[in-house]
Image (cartoon, rainbow, N blue to C red):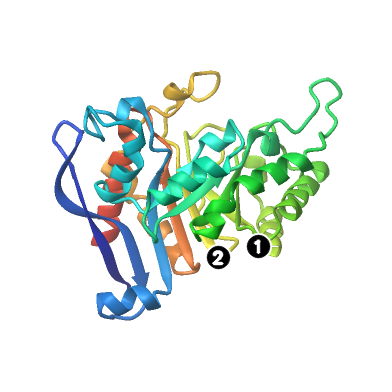
Amino acid sequence: MTYVHFFPLKLFLSATGNIRVDIFLPFVLFLGHRALRPDSFIQTMEETIKIGTSGFSFPDWKGTIYPPGIREKDMLSFYEKELGFHALEINFTYYTLPSQKSLAGMAQKTSESFEFVVKSFKGMTHEIWDKETRARIDNQETFKKFKYGLIPLMEERKLACVLAQFPYGFFPNRENSSYLQQFKTEMGDLPLVFEFRNKAWLKEETFQSLEKSGIGFCVVDEPKLPQLMPYLPRATSEIGYFRFHGRNPNWFNVPLKVRYDYLYSERELKEFVPGIKEISEKVAKTLIFFNNCYSGSAAKNAAQMAKLLMNE
């Protein structure tokens, strides 16, 4: 039997789909195999599930997720203290290398138990080929700068892992498989999770390679298009990782706000619960992030998912 202990949070989905700060729902769930008192359970937990969103600072969250007049500098504190999230996926580091100053500031605004996932810079996953010669770019200096920016989170023990998302055009071949190993070498002992967009990576050879290297596999849900990765719960390290992108069929060659404009129904969310439970029983930590951030859908679905997991 699985026992659940959770931190309360003030969140309620109104009839209109907006979030009201009204009642308590769980976002952070601690799962174990023994019934313990809550105070001792947290200290001896065997598995952890944390739910969050892929980003938190969005203008269209004002008035739907956040109070209308909230200042940007107050959003992260509200995200944790009022919405109850205890994990965040940082995505702006894909577009610009992380700075120690910015990550130190984020660490200071959050509690001791809060954790961050930092998405790797595009110069580590997407822009790794010379546009003219198609030769691999020497990006060792990029890795060094990226790791340097993470130091504040590492010092505060708030870095859950680094997420490396590889593009659709990153196919499984000898050169790219070698690069994955190089990526691991460059990152050293930092916990890693790889996300693949091309379903050609979905084979046993990939899972075995990730397991051997101690790299986590990102389980994704995205539109059911022939080229994209299907939903397949699998763990290849001590970190179970789920990333929900939405199922908007307008995926390719559209603005990001269109790609991620999707709100999961409760029926759809229920389909994921068995896989999440199965993975959480095998790993030390399970991280769940919703990336369908348009109009606050990510926060709304995260609230629903937390409630579904609590009721299991």
Going 32% across and 76% down the picture, which residue do you hit?
41
Quadrant where the N terminus is found in the figure: bottom left
Horizontal side of 77 relative to 193 (left or right) equals: left
Question: How far across and down, in percent of the image, does residue 25 sit?
Answer: 21, 53
Going 23% across and 60% down the picture, which residue do you hit?
311
**Label 1 near label 2: C-beta < 8 Å?**
yes
Determine the CA span between mark 2 and mark 1: 8 Å
Q: Amino acid at mark 1?
A: Gly
Q: Which is more N-terminal, label 1 or label 2? A: 1
Q: Amino acid at mark 2?
A: Glu
Residue on which disc 2 sits = 238
Instruction: Decide: few, some or many residues near mark 1? Use Cα within 10 Å; few <14, some 14-19, many ≥20.
Output: some
Q: Secondary structure at mark 2?
A: loop
Going 53% across and 61% down the picture, which residue do you hit?
239
Horizontal side of 182 relative to 6 (left or right) equals: right
Using the image, determine if residue 176 lies above or below residue 212.
above
Q: Quadrant of residue 212?
A: bottom right
Residue on which disc 1 sits = 214
Question: How far across and down, in percent of the image, does residue 5 sit?
Answer: 28, 68
